[in-house]
Amino acid sequence: MRYSIINVLKQGLAGQKGWQAAWRDATPKPQYDVVIVGGGGHGLATAYYLAKLHGITNVAVLEKGWIGSGNTGRNTTIVRSNYLLPGNEPFYEHSLKLWEGMSRDLNFNVMFSQRGVLNLCHSDAQRDAYARRGNAMLMMGADAELLDADQVRRMVRGLDFQNPRFPITGGLLQRRGGTARHDAVAWGYARAASELGVDIIQNCEVTGFVRDDDRITAVETSRGRIAAGKVGLAVAGHSSLLAEMAGIRLPIESHVLQAFVSEGLKPWIDTVVTFGAGHFYISQSDKGGLVFGGDIDGYASYAQRGNLPVVEHVAAGAVALFPALGRVRLLRSWGGVMDMTPDGSPIIGKLPIGNLYMTGGWCYGGFKATPASGWCLAHTIANDAPHALNEAMSLERFARGRAIDERGAGPRPNLH
Amino acid sequence: MSQAFRLGSGGRIDRSASLRFRFDGQSFQGHPGDTLASALLANGVHLVGRSFKYHRPRGIMTAGSEEPNALVQLAPAKARTEPNVRATVVELKNGLVAESQNRWPSLGFDLGQLNDVLSPLFPAGFYYKTFMWPKAFWERVYEPRIRAIAGLGVAPAKPDPDRYLHRHAHCDVLVVGGGPAGIAAALEAGRSGKRVILVDEQAELGGGLLALPDAAVEGLDELAALPEVRVLTRTTCTGYYDHNYLVMLERVTDHLAEPDPDLPRQRLWRVRAGEVVLATGALERPLVFRGNDRPGVMLASAARAYVNRWAVRLGSRAVVFTNNDTAYAAAFDLHRAGIEVGCIVDVRPEPKGKLVAEARELGIRIRAGSVVTGTEGPLRVNQAVVAPLDQAGGIGGYLGTVEPCDLLLVSGGWNPNVGLFSQARGRLRFDDALAAFVTGDASLPREQRLRSVGGAAGDFSGFDAPPTPLLPIWAVPSDRRGKAFVDFQNDVTAKDLGLALTEGLRSIEHVKRFTTTGMGTDQGKTSNVNALAIVAETLAKPVAEVGTTTFRPPYVPVTFGALVGHSRGDLFDVERRTAMHDLAVARGAVFEDVGNWKRAWYFPKPGEDMHAAVVRETRQVREAGGILDASTLGKIDVQGRDARTFLNRVYTNAWSKLAPGMCRYGLMLRDDGMVYDDGVTACLDDRHFHMTTTTGGAPRVLAWLEDLLQTEWPELEVYLTSVTEQWATMAVNGPLAREILAPLVEDCDLAAEAFPHMAWRAARIAGVQGRIFRISFTGELAFEVNVPADQGAAVLAAILEVAEPRGVTLYGTETMHVLRAEKGFIIVGQETDGTTTPIDLGMDWIVAKKKGDFIGKRGLERPDLVAGDRKQLVGLLTKDQKTVLVEGAQVVATPTGRVPWPMLGHVTSAYASPNAGRPIALALVAGGHARHGQTLWVPMPGKRPIPVEITAPVFFDPENKRLHG
C-alpha cells in the first residue's frame, strides 16, 4: 500500500488493519544475477538502484542479522557534503542531492532535515583551513558559508565563546546538511527494492565464496549455497573479513566508534554543531535527545561496544562547548565497527576478482554516503566499470599513491 | 492540609522534623527520610506528569530508579535546574522546588491530551508514511511542530555551577547492591580481610528489606567495624567494562538543602575489582492491560514500600492484580495499615498455599482465574473492571464486573536485575518458571570475574512471598477499545507492537526501533520483558528465540558533569605557557594558540594594530635584529648506542657523519612519503642528540617515535625523553645578533669562523650555563639561545637590556611567519597538509638517494607520487603588486569559469611583505614547478578573480648572503 496521508487516515479509521509488511521476508532462491552481501543502507540502496536504474531485478540482499543492524542503525545520522578534495566532494554532493529527493523517491519519510551543519573554528589556522574547504566546496557546486563569531552566536544557543583554549571565532556552515532518521533509510530502501522484485533475505550469513578461476560462482551461506552472477560487498565494519573469504587482503582496520544520546529535552540545538578541535559533534533529534559522538576508541576491534575513556573525553568536549550540559544526563552509549582505511576515504569499485565489487572503508562517514554509495556500486556492477563519481575511490589508489586524504593523517587507519 | 495521607505511625521517616517543598507551585510538607514521590503521595498527589506522546495523565508507578512515569523538573529556571528527574529517587530536602513536565497549560488540564483522542491516526511509525508532500513542508511545518511537542524537561540555560570529581579505586571484592544478599556477601569477604567496596543506590543499606513492615537490617554494625570494607550509599554502579572495570556514580550533595562548597556535587568512581558480586536484586514487572497507566496504578512492591517505609496511606480502597504470590504480601500490609483491599485478582485459576489461606483469614476476597480487563478514572483510577479468563485465555465476551478502587496494585512477576551482568557480556537465559531472563554465569568471558547472588541470580528464597508459582500473562485481554501500555514513558502499546509485526518488522530490534519501546530514560527496565514476550506470543515463538535487547551502559542516566569531572573550563585542555610568558605579557604581547601553547603573536606599540605591528617588527628584524620566544618547539633528547641509526631511519637525509658540535635540518616523512614534521637536530656526542620538532607536532612525534622503537625496531637501543619544558629557547636574529650576544656570552667565541652556521656550542649566557645553536628561520644571522627553563625569563631580560637600545625588538609568531615566507621556508601544517611530499615542496635535496632505508622511501616511489601533475610549492605575486591574497583561496587556470570549476591548487600563505616591498604568497599548484612565469587566477567569492604570477618561492635574499653574515 502506498504511504500517504490519505492511507494513514483511512487506516486510522480502520484500526490499522490494512497495512502489509514493508518488504517481503524472502527465502533464498538457488540463483541470482547479483548477490549483495550486507543488508545495511548501502547494500539495500545498491539493490534498489540496480533494479530501478539498471533494470537488474534478479537480485538478493543477504543480511546475517536484521536489516540495518550494523552501522546504518548505530550512527549519529549526520548528512553533509562539506568535503575538500576533488576525489570526494562531487561524490558527496551527489549523495546530498539524492538525500534531498529520497523520501519521495522511496515513498518513505526518512525525515531528512536540512537543519545545517556547522563546523566551529577556534584559531586563525583553522579558519584558513575552513576557508580553503569552503572555497573548494563552492567551486565544486556545493553550498558553504564562512561565519564569524556573531553569526554563530545568532545560530546556536548556549555555546561557550570564551573557552580558554577554544574560543569560538567562527565556523563553516553548510545549510543543506542536516540529519535523517537512520533506521528509516534501511527500511525505506528495503521496501522500495522489494517492490521492484529484490529479495531481502535476513538471518542469512555469508560463510564463504565458491570460486572458479577468476570468478565467484556462488556464495556459501548459513542458509545454503546461492549461485551468483556478480557479487557486491556492502559490509562496512567487516569488509576485511568478507574480502578475506574471497582471498583478498584489504588495507582496512576495524575500529570501534561510540555514539551517545542524552535524555529527551525540549528543543535546544537546532543545527548540527561540530567541534573538531575538541573531537565532538552534536545534534538534537526530533524526539528531543541530544545525539553526539567523538573519536574512535583507538584500538582495533570488532565489538559493537566501547570503553570509558572515550565516553569521558566526549562528555568533556560536550561541556566545553555547552557548559550548561553539566546537569543534563547521558542516557545511552553504543558502539559501531568502522572500516578504517589508510587515507580516510572509502573504497567503491571492482576488486581483483572478475565479478566481485565492493563498497566499504567508510571510516565513520558512511551514513551520509548511503544513497550515492549504493548508486555508484549499482552503476559499477551493472557496467563492470566505475562511474566518474567513484573512479577515484578505487582499491588501486593505495598502491599507486593517489590517496584521497581529507585529513592529511596518512596511512595509519586509526588516525582518520 | 498537610500530609493528610500519612499513616499515624510507622515508617522510616523522621516525624520530629518537617520539610517544606513545592510542586507545581503548591506548597507541601514532608519528613526527612521521604523521597519526593513518597512526600507527594503522603499529600495525596498521585498525578505527577504527562506522557511523552499522548500526554496521558501519569502517576507514580515504582519506588526506585526504574520509574518510567514520575519525571519532574527540579529547581525550574535556576542554574541548578535539572530535567527528567525521577521523583522516586529524589530525597526530600527543605525548600525543594519541582515542576511537572510536558504539559500545557497545566498538569490537570493539558491540551496535549488531544493527541490521545487522535491517537488512532498516529500509531507507531505513522511519521514514516506521511509528511512527504509538499516537500518543503517537512522542514518548515511538520518537523518543527513535532520537535516542539517532543522532548520532556528543559535543559538548563546557564553554565552548571557545581563541581564534580573522579576517583579511582581498587578492591578485592566489589559488591553491587546493599540488600540482604549484598550485605552477606560483603560481610563474608570482609571477614577474611579482603578489601571490599559495597555500593548501594539508596541513602541507606537494606535494599528490599526496607520495604518490609518493621524492617530490621542486620549486619550493619559488623560491616562498619571491618577495617577493609568501604560502604558507599547513594552510589549507583552504572557501567561494567572489560577486565572488571566498573563505573559508579556517587551523589554526594544532591540530598542537601544547600550544596556544601567543600564537596563535589557528584563523584564518579572508576573501580578495578578482583571479583564482582552482583547483588542488584530484582525488579517487579507491570501487567499490560487497558488503562494500566492511570495514576493510582502501581507496582505491588512499590505500594508495599510506600506503606511500610514511608507510612503513606496510598488510597482508601485497593484492588490487587497479580499472577504470582508476591503481591499477596503487599495486600496484607495494606490491609494492616487500614487500607481496604477490595479483592485480589489472581490470574492463576487455583492459587494455593498459606498466603491464600491468610488472605481468607483477613477477609480479603480472591478472584482467581481472573484478570483486570481495564480501568477507568479521569486523572486517577476510580475503578477496575474484572473478568474471569476462559479456557482459551480470553474473556469470552464477558463484560466484567466493576471493582471501585483508587489504588490498583499490579504484579506481573519479577525480572532479575541483570543489566550489569549483561554489560559484562554475560549471556542471558529465559527461565520459564520465573518467566524472566536469568544469568548464565558459565557464559562469561574469562577476564570478567563476577558472580550474581540473591534476586539478581534468580534466587528469591529471601522473599517473604517468592514470585513462584507464576502464571505468565502478557497481553491481558481487554473489555473494550483502549490503550494497554508496554512502555509507559514512550507511550508504546501492545497494539503498536502488533502493528510493527504486521509491517514486517519482526526482529525484536526492529520492533524496538519502530515503536521506540525500551528507549526512554528508564531504558526499558519495566517494559523490555513484556515487549519481548508479547512479540513472541504474537509470532508464536518461544521468548528465547525472539532474543533480548542489548543492555547498554549506563545502567541509569549519568550527568555529563560527573563524566567530565575536572576536565572543564580552564582544565578542559590545559593551556601551556613558556618561561618567558609573563615577560611577553608585560611587553603587551597579543597571544595566539598553537597546539596547547600560548605564543606571543605580535607586540603592538600604542596605537598599532596587528598589521602595523607586524610591518614594524619585520623591518626591525632585518634592519637591526629581533628576538623570538621559540621555547614551544618540541625538544626530544635522543640517547643510546643506536641513536644515529635511528635518526637515519626517521629522517630523509643522512646523519652518519654529523659531528659533535654540529646541527642538521631534517624532514620526517610518514610511511606514505608525506611530510610529517621537521626540525633541527644537534649532535651532542656520538650517542646523544638534541632533536627539535614543530610546536604542534611535538606530542605526536614523540608518541610516534616511541611507537616505532617499541614495536618496529625493538632491537635499537635508543632512549627518548621529552625536554620541551626543560629548556627556554630564544632566537636572536638579525644583523646585530652577534654584537648583542657577545657581551653576555662566556666560554664561547661567536665569530663566524669559530662558530659557523649550523653549529652549536655550550656557553654561559648572562651567567647561566646553556647551549647556543647557530640556526636561522629568518634567513638572517641568528643564534638560538637555550637555557634551563627557570632561568629563561632572567636571561631574556638580560639580552633585552643590551638589545633594545640598539633597535632590536621582541617579535611574535606572525612576524616569524612573514620572515620565513620571504625566504620560502615552509611551515609543516601550513605549506603541507599531510598530502605533500618533499618533492612537491621542491626539497628533493633533502631526500638521500644513497643511504639505506628510511620511513617514506618506498612510499615516495609509488607511480602517482612521481607524476608531474601533483600540487607543488610555488610563489605567487599579485599582478597589481598591492593585493594581499587570502590563505585558503583556490587557484584556477582562467579568469572565468562555471561550477564545477577545476582547481589547480590553493594559497597556503599570504602576507604583506615590507622587506620584499610587495605582497607575497606561497601556494601549492598542480605542476607548479613547471609553471614559473605563468599567469593564473585566484577567484574570490563575490569578487573578480585576482591575476597572479607564478614564481619561485623565495622573495628575499635569494643568495643567502645575510645568513652567513
Image: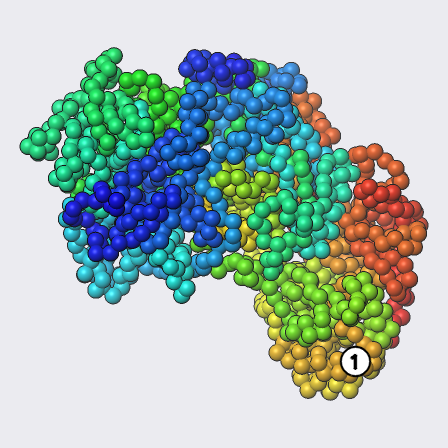
> How many numbered marks, from 0 up?
1
Residue drawn where x is 10% and y is 32% of the image: B359
Vertical order, B54 against B793 (above or below): above
Marked residue chain, label 1: B
**Left or right: residue B516 compared with residue B403:** right
In depth, the one of B270 and B586 nearer the eye is B586
**Residue B99 visible in the displayed image:** yes
Specify whether B317 is left or right of B720: left
Residue B584, percent across and down? 69, 72
Dot 1 amino acid type: Ala
Question: As drawn, is B684 to the left or to the right of B448?
Answer: right
Residue at image coords 41%, 36%: B106
Q: Measured from the top left, where is residue B843 in percent x and y?
A: 80, 57
Q: Classify B652 as above or below A67.
A: below
Residue A30 visible in the snapshot: no
Position of A132 with respect to B56 (left or right) is right
The crowd level at tag 1 (other Cα within 10 Å; few <14, some 14-19, many 20+) is: many
Foreground of the two, B276 or B301: B301
Classify A382 as above or below A265.
above
Q: What residue do we see at 82% from left, 55% from top?
A: B910
The residue wearing badge 1 is B803
Say which of B867 and A343 sits in front.
Answer: A343
Q: Residue B158, image x and y in percent? A: 52, 52
Rendered-image quadrant of the C terminus of chain B: bottom right
